[in-house]
Image (cartoon, helix red, strand yellow):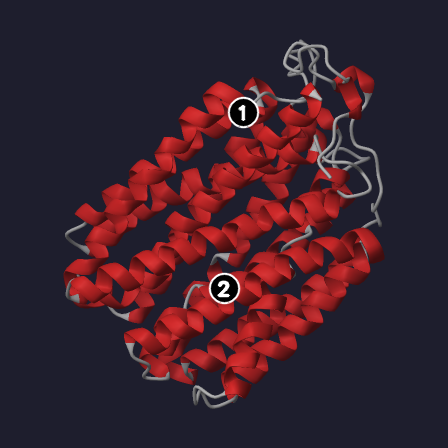
């Protein structure tokens, strides 16, 4: 019983971390129209700032994973949540594009550090039979965070002019820091942090003979997953507002429908990962992403049932394709280097994918925002489908050994049998 409680607390902590990531990070896309006005910026500058932030998040993810393997998952999770909350709030103080870029880079670094730490913490509690579903539910927390930021956007932008409302929106970003009090009091690591002397660094091991193939292909998969996600969602509010000329209410309506689709996508994909396996499920959702991106861009937005249905499907597939990455990457690396491996491949992939928003920002003036989004999205889907079939199928794999279990943190209660169903 005690171990089940510990597992649920780990789920809550990881979900809080990832959901609050979604809350703070999606604020930038929502606030971007107001930022462009207030700081006299163009779309290309907005795209580059998004890219710089994502590049920083790649470095943050690698750093966060290494720190989690060195000092423990729960401890590092507290500090990264505090950091991205503070830097999100400080974004509200920016007076020019340079200051804005500085705060977004620092926020991006902390944002990137959170995912591998929380994913490793939860994956090590999850049952091998239901790990896909468990990690899918974890990914859905991002959608909840996005929904809350969209609600905040609607309320704040309804009360204030766009050129100042974005500052109030970012100030709300300090609130996630409150989550650290829950984590400090309630959450323990499942695995024991082993500080052995004369061992190779986890980064070195990632490129050892036995691991390098997995590492390189997992990086390409991480790129595909995130390039699809960021090509669609980084510019979606701006696309709806400026290209489709929707009002605040119209934009928010489409965002809510898309977010509802995201929630369905995260959970359904997690379930299918356990039923069908990693490679078939990824393939299904990448194909769905490609089809719905093209349909959404080429189809007129009229506010009718058909256009809303396409927005829902866009959310289902473009978000659902990312639902399995937490489970899959945890199964590709051994415990001693799991957080480092997850952080490295996910965030190096994110660093490459970061050039997607820059491409969209730069080429919007030449080929249109919709065509730029399709170019990045379809390229990413194609590469990801190829890559996932070059990686092993790991569905049902046990990832925790008895020697890995942190008996002190688990209060000697149940050891390696703990899981989240």
Residue hosting label 1: 74
Mark closer to the chain start, 2 or 1: 1
Quadrant of the snapshot with the N terminus = top right
Single out the mark in the foreground, 2 or 1. 2
**What is the secondary structure assignment of the residue under circle 2?**
helix
Whether residue 361 is visible, yes or no, is no
**Crowd class of label 2 (few under 14; some 14 to 19; many from 20; radius 10 Å):** many
Q: How many marks?
A: 2
Q: Nearer the viewer, residue 343 or 98?
A: 343
Q: Residue at x 68, y 65 (%)?
A: 383
- Residue 306's x, y, as percent? 55, 87
**Apparent side of residue 310 relative to residue 171 in the rendered image (left or right):** right
The answer to whether residue 122 is visible is yes
Specify the quadrant of the image occupied by residue 303: bottom left
CA gap between label 2 and label 1 equals: 28 Å
Horizontal and vertical percent position of residue 62: 54, 36
Position of residue 106 measured from the top left corner of the image (x, y, whole percent): 35, 40
The image shows residue 16, relative to residue 381, as above or below, that is above
Neighbours of disc 1 within 10 Å: few (<14), some (14-19), many (20+): many
Residue at the spot 33% in from the left edge and 48% down from the top edge: 104
The quadrant in which the C terminus is found is: top right
* Residue at the disc numbered 2: 259
Front-most of residues 342 and 128: 128
Q: Would you identify the image quadrant in which residue 335 lies?
A: top right
């Amino acid at each position: 019983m005690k171990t089940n409680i510990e597992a649920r607390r780990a789920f809550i902590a990881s979900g809080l971390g990832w959901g609050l990531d979604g809350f703070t990070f999606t604020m930038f896309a929502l606030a971007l129209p107001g930022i462009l006005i207030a700081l006299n910026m163009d779309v290309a500058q907005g795209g580059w700032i998004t890219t710089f932030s994502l590049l920083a998040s790649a470095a943050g993810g690698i750093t966060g994973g290494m720190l989690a393997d060195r000092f423990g998952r729960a401890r590092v999770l507290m500090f990264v949540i505090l950091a991205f909350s503070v830097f999100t709030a400080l974004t509200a103080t920016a007076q020019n594009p340079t200051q804005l870029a500085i705060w977004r880079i620092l926020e991006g670094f902390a944002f990137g550090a959170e995912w591998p730490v929380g994913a490793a913490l939860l994956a090590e509690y999850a049952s091998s039979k239901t790990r896909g579903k468990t990690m899918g539910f974890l990914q859905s927390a991002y959608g909840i965070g996005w929904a809350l930021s969209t609600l905040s956007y609607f309320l704040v932008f309804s009360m204030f002019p766009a050129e100042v409302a974005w500052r109030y929106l970012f100030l709300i970003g300090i609130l996630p820091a409150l989550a650290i009090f829950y984590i400090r009091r309630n959450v323990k690591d499942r695995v024991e942090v082993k500080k052995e002397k004369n061992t190779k660094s986890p980064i070195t091991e990632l490129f050892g003979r036995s691991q390098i193939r997995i590492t390189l292909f997992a990086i390409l998969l991480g790129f595909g997953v995130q390039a699809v996600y960021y090509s669609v969602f980084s510019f979606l509010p701006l696309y709806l507002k400026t290209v489709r000329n929707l009002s605040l209410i119209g934009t928010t309506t489409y965002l809510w429908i898309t977010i509802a689709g995201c929630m369905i996508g995260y959970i359904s994909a997690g379930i299918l990962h356990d039923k069908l396996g990693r490679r078939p499920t990824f393939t299904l959702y990448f194909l769905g992403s490609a089809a719905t991106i093209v349909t959404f861009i080429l189809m007129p937005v009229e506010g009718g049932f058909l256009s809303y249905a396409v927005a829902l499907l866009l959310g289902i597939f473009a978000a659902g394709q990312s639902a399995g990455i937490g489970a899959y990457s945890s199964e590709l690396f051994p415990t001693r280097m799991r957080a480092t491996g997850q952080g490295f491949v996910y965030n190096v992939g994110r660093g490459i994918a970061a050039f997607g928003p820059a491409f969209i920002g730069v080429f919007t003036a030449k080929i249109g925002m919709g065509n730029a989004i399709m170019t990045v999205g379809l390229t990413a889907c194609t590469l990801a489908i190829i890559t996932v079939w070059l990686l092993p199928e790991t569905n049902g794999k046990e990832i925790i050994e008895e020697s890995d279990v942190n008996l002190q943190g688990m209060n000697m209660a149940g050891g390696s049998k703990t899981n989240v169903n």
